[in-house]
Amino acid sequence: MKKLHRSRSDRKLSGVLGGLSDYLGIDASILRILFVILLIPTGFFPLGIIYIAWIFLVPEESDII
């Protein structure tokens, strides 16, 4: 069973999008590009707020998976 986590190995800032890409089964680069494309026109809200919230709410990947 897949669990949502923040990635330790596939991270640029905090591993949120790397973990989400593992969970969804898509490439992390595609997810990052899509995130930035959607972030810029919305003026940081709501995607930026959701990203910051996920840093604190989604647990980091454990050493044993």
Image: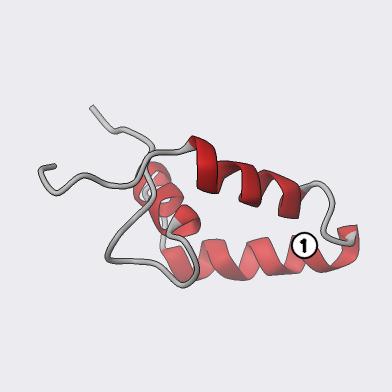
Position of 59 relative to 39 (above/below): above
| Residue at horizontal 38 percent and vertical 39 percent from the top | 59
The front one of 64 and 17 is: 64
Q: Where's residue 56, x and y in %?
A: 52, 42
Residue drawn at point x = 65 percent, y = 63 percent:
34
Expressed as whole percent of the image width and height from the top left, the position of residue 37 reads 74, 68
Compared with 65, 2 (above or below) is: above
Left or right of residue 9, residue 15 in this image: right
Which three-letter amino acid code belongs to the residue tagged 1?
Leu
Q: Quadrant of the C terminus?
A: top left
**What x and y, as percent, mark residue 57?**
51, 36
Q: Nearer the viewer, residue 27 or 11?
A: 11
Q: Residue at x 69, y 68 (%)?
A: 36
Q: Number of labelled discs?
A: 1
Q: Quadrant of residue 15?
A: bottom left
Mark 1 lies on a secondary structure that is helix
Q: Which residue is mark 1?
A: 39
- Farthest-out residue, front: 56
In this image, 46 relative to 43: left or right?
left
Quarter of the rendering containing residue 44: bottom right
